[in-house]
Image (cartoon, rainbow, N blue to C red):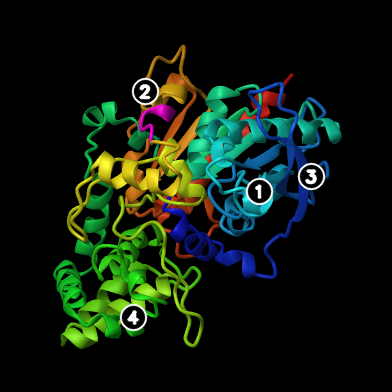
Amino acid sequence: MPSSSFVLVLIASLGGSSALASFPGYSEKFFNQTLDHFNPADSRHWQHRYLVNDSYWDGRGKLKNGCRGPILLYTGNEGDITAFWGSNGFMIEVLAPKLGGLLLFPEERYYGKSMPFGPDSLTAENLVYLTTEQVIEDYVDLLYHIKSSTNSENCPVIAFGGSYGGTLTTFLRASHPEAVVGGLAASAPIGYYDKHGWSEHGVTQYTWSDIVTKSYAEAHPQCLQTIVDAVSAINNAPIEMLVRAFHVCEPAGLGPNAPSELFQYALENLPQENYPYPVGNNPGWPVNATCDRLVAAATSETSLIEAAASFAAESFGYSSGGPCIATLTEGPGSVPGDGPGPGNWGWQSCTENLHQFSSRGVRNFTFNLQTNAIDVCNAAFNQSVSPDTTALTRQYGGYALAYGDVSSGVSNLIWSNGGLDPWGGGGFIKPGNPDSGNHWIWMAKGAHHLDLRGPHPQDPPEVTAARKKEEEIITQWIMDASNV
């Protein structure tokens, strides 16, 4: 769940398999969606984009209640929904054909083509309708539309989501158990929102960055020191040289506070992409490859700067001879992994999605709510919003969702997390009460929602085992829901 400046590059790389000719395609459709689900007097609507594939919904998965097959819903998160299609091979290539399922991928409002106010959507006045609560209601309304228009009211729905999408899956099941019978929430960092529960679950303000640092420390014995040396060399180098080396459009593109911040930002986000095989522009195990690259270049400050700059430029989509990298409005120098600032995810961070992270190791940073968030949000949105760091926990629950009273908690959820993923530090990791019907899956060599991707020969064994267990659980949920 990186800031929106980085997420467009990240999800493009995550969707690598969508380029394969054999990967199933989708139809793009639009639904006349309600703008404000909580104001009956507001009759405004907007065109909500969703992707659908019904090629497997042909009766092969017919259930005892007469349903032709389950509905597999991806709870779209912060990005263009088409980029998420290719990174969800477990749903698309495995479960849909086996279960005879309808694939439904709604786009999150205010992203991609789902802009309620068109080109004016990202103003402070119009962004007030971008909340987690409104997004969830979008998906519920779309589900009921699909069911009623296809005569499939009795078909069970399974929700899937990765990162913030996994958070949405969890909150959807918690708030609308009648709409979805279960959900797979992969790499959902819900615990990071519940600061009061951090101590009990071994989480601190440094957990996110400590996982990042651990990734580089384990990749190469000289990697962390080389990163420190690279940061020092970059900060002491002539700005004109750095602009050319990093392929940024202007000096400000290197970072708002120090020239090394763009490099550090790229380093911080790489561990969540630490997959065992090539994805997008990344090689297999990209953290290890990056460490090898930097250490090999540490023969001189010049070569080290060039290697660091080349890595950072590639991370943000630069290709030889292509356009320069525009200055990022959020991310570099800001809260690790987050991005209070202008734009859609900047708004979400400035309202209810801010994480209170500090950093050490790859970058030293001390979180301060006023200077790192409130002041930034005031400048970005005309002093109209201020982060509420407890909003989501108050409304939906934090750790209590997974570890609270079974009689009042959520049920039928799978929370999967990986040891290589900094977002996993805020996930529901340790097993809770099995009587809840929930499941906790841990993958030591898992990066950010790796289990949602399609099977690959180079998958770590525990990831393959995780998908097998998830399939068994989901299949049972479907059988139970349709056994009437």
Identify the residue position indicated by label 2 in the image: 403
Q: Which mark is in front, 4 or 2?
A: 4
Left or right: residue 165 versus residue 108 is: left
Identify the residue position indicated by label 4 in the image: 243
Residue 326, percent from left and from top:
45, 71
Identify the residue position indicated by label 3 in the image: 57
What residue sits 56% from the left and 41% below the top? 127
Query: Which one is earlier in the sequence, the residue at label 4 or at label 1?
Result: 1
Query: Which one is earlier in the sequence, the residue at label 2 or at label 1?
Result: 1
Left or right: residue 35 versus residue 372 is: right
Question: What numbered label is drawn on residue 263?
Answer: none
Residue 81, percent from left and from top:
62, 53
Disc 1 marks which amino acid? Met
Residue 141, percent from left and from top:
71, 31
Q: Is 273 in front, or is 81?
A: 81
Query: Which one is earlier in the sequence, the residue at label 2 or at label 3?
Result: 3
Query: Spatial distance from mark 2 to mark 1, Cα to Cα?
Result: 37 Å
Query: Spatial distance from mark 2 to mark 3, Cα to Cα?
Result: 36 Å
Q: Is residue 74 above or below residue 241?
A: above
Identify the residue position indicated by label 1 in the image: 115
Query: Which one is earlier in the sequence, the residue at label 1 or at label 3?
Result: 3
Q: Secondary structure at mark 2?
A: helix
Query: Which one is earlier in the sequence, the residue at label 4 or at label 2?
Result: 4
Q: Which mark is in front, 4 or 3?
A: 4
Q: Residues within 10 Å of mark 3 (few under 14, many from 20)?
A: many
Disc 2 marks which amino acid? Tyr
Contact flag, marks 4 and 2 (Cβ < 8 Å): no
- Magenta residue span: 387-392
Query: Spatial distance from mark 4 to mark 3, Cα to Cα?
Result: 52 Å
What residue sits 41% from the left and 55% below the top? 461
